[in-house]
Image (cartoon, rainbow, N blue to C red):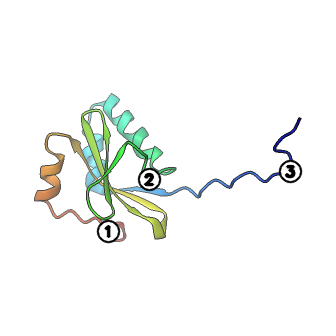
Amino acid sequence: MGGRQGKPRPLEPPLYRVKLHPKAAKELAALPKEDQRRVRDDIDLLAATPRPVGRAEQIDKDIYRIATGRYRSVYRVLDSDRLVAVFLIGHRRNVYEVLERTNRETDPKRW
């Protein structure tokens, strides 16, 4: 009857902390309220799985982007610190131009 009785449950992986760059926080605040909520929900989910299969696309060595409707959140994953650092949020038509054009600091220790 019991089947799995007596077997230990797998441990949940420790969650990552999520940190927003101050400019990313301003970009998020400038979005329409409904889009803010959706983007914030997706960013919060990154704490459990910083590289969601089928959703996150790798841009560079440890830099990823996640799409939420018309908006993109660009972030860096620091596995050693268990940290997801979101440093750019913007509309899909210009977020990559902004990423190339600016030299935004991606090291959250310097924020």
Q: Secondary structure at mark 3?
A: loop
Residue 19 falls left or right of residue 6: left
Judge the density around disc 3: few (<14), some (14-19), many (≥20) Cα neighbours within 10 Å: few
Number of numbered discs on residues = 3
**Of 109 and 15, the residue lying toward us:** 15
Q: Quadrant of residue 38?
A: top left
Looking at the picture, which amino acid does disc 3 mark? Gly
Q: Which residue is mark 3?
A: 6
Residue position for label 2: 50
Task: Calculate the distance from the C-alpha at mark 1 to the C-alpha at mark 2.
Answer: 16 Å
Looking at the picture, how far across and down is residue 57, in whole percent? 31, 49
Q: Residue at x 31, y 32 (%)?
A: 35
| Mark nearer the N terminus (1 vs 3) | 3
Left or right of 24 in this view: 48: right
Element under disc 2: loop
Q: Amino acid at mark 1?
A: Asp
Mark 2: amino acid: Pro
Q: Quadrant of residue 100?
A: bottom left
Which disc is residue 107 wearing? 1
Foreground of the two, 96 or 41: 96
* Rendering coords of residue 22 (x, y %): 30, 56
The image's mark for residue 55 is none
Q: Tell me the distance, in whole angstroms, between the alpha carbons under discs 2 and 3.
A: 32 Å
The residue carrying pointer 1 sits among few (fewer than 14), some (14 to 19) or many (20 or more) residues within 10 Å by Cα, namely few
Q: Decide if residue 90 is on the left or right side of residue 111.
A: left
- Identify the image quadrant of the C terminus: bottom left
Is residue 17 depicted above or below 40 in this figure?
A: below
